[in-house]
């Protein structure tokens, strides 16, 4: 193998049977306080025609959060920024510590790569039947990166099996985003749990506490944003 072969960089997403893609979704959660009445926010979001959702914050009676969704990260420094820096959003108090930003990613085993990267995350975030949402970042401990590949795979699979079981029962559905180098606190991932009711989302987090990854290989988890969707854009 030549030096060129050894240093070749591939940033494509890869799925099963040789699938590749340069497309992915980017999502950002912006959280605010000091919102007396969110009705004007709904009107502004509808007029903007962005993809996303507006949540009422369970832990702050004057709190809200806006989820933005786009394939181009430039959107978050152009259109999304412009929306959130004018009225009625300009009057709100931003909670920067709760900002979350990430991108969809593949593990190499996805049977339908575009479904996993583009269509499924939209369905999870924008389904009016699943208004409850729990969003949080996490960072794995450095020891996880030093484990052999098969051992890493077995540990991650434990979480995947749990997630599939809760999803199959329509109790909780997950959105998984990578945020390496994108997060102010150096987190690795952003997770969104959505569902019809709040209790199963809490139950899933509780159950995952017992897994090897959470109990032994997570350095940080949270902070958590818990919200109920007041508005979701139509699924495109």
Image (cartoon, rainbow, N blue to C red):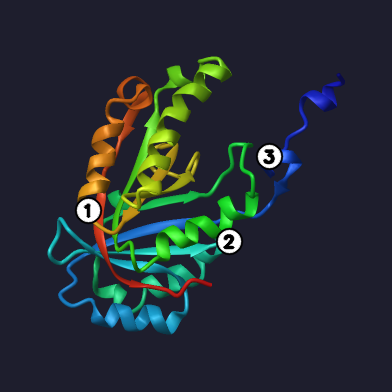
Q: Specify few, some or many for label 3: CA neighbours under 10 Å numbering under 14, 14-19, or 20 or more.
A: some
Q: Is residue 71 left or right of residue 100?
A: right
Residue at the front extreme, as displayed: 169
Q: Is residue 137 left or right of residue 6?
A: left
User: Marks 1 and 3: in contact by CB < 8 Å?
Assistant: no
Q: Which residue is mark 2?
A: 71
Q: Quadrant of residue 202?
A: top left
Q: Nearer the viewer, residue 187 or 20?
A: 20
Residue at (23% x, 76% y) in the render:
38
Q: Which residue is mark 1?
A: 198
Residue at (64% x, 49% y) in the render:
113
Q: Earlier in the sequence, mark 1 or mark 2?
A: 2
Q: Quadrant of the N terminus?
A: top right
Q: Is residue 83 above or below residue 68?
A: below
Q: Which residue is mark 3?
A: 16
* Mark 3 secondary-structure assignment: helix
Observer-side mark, 1 or 2, equals: 1
Residue 29 image point, x, y percent: 37, 57
Q: Is residue 92 above or below residue 139?
A: below
Q: Specify few, some or many for label 2: CA neighbours under 10 Å numbering under 14, 14-19, or 20 or more.
A: some
Q: Which mark is residue 53?
A: none
Q: Nearer the viewer, residue 137 or 159?
A: 159
Q: Quadrant of residue 2?
A: top right
């Amino acid at each position: 193998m030549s030096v060129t072969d050894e240093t070749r960089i591939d940033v494509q997403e890869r799925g099963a049977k040789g699938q590749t893609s340069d497309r992915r979704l980017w999502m950002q959660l912006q959280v605010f306080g000091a919102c007396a009445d969110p009705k004007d926010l709904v009107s502004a979001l509808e007029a903007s025609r962005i993809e996303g959702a507006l949540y009422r914050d369970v832990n702050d009676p004057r709190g809200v959060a806006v989820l933005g969704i786009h394939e181009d990260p430039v959107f978050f420094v152009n259109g999304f920024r412009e929306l959130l820096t004018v009225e009625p959003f300009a009057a709100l108090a931003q909670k920067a510590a709760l900002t979350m930003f990430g991108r969809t990613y593949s593990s190499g085993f996805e049977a339908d790569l575009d479904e996993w990267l583009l269509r499924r995350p939209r369905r999870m975030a924008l389904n009016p039947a699943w208004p409850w949402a729990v969003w949080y970042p996490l960072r794995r401990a450095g020891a996880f990166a030093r484990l052999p590949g098969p051992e890493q795979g077995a540990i991650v699979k434990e979480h995947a099996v749990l997630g599939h079981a809760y999803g199959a029962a329509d109790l909780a559905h997950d959105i998984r985003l990578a945020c390496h180098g994108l997060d102010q606190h150096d987190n690795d991932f952003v997770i969104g749990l959505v569902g019809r009711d709040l209790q199963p989302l809490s139950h899933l987090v509780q159950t995952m506490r017992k897994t090897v990854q959470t109990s032994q290989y997570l350095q940080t988890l949270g902070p958590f944003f818990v919200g109920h969707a007041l508005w979701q854009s139509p699924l495109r």
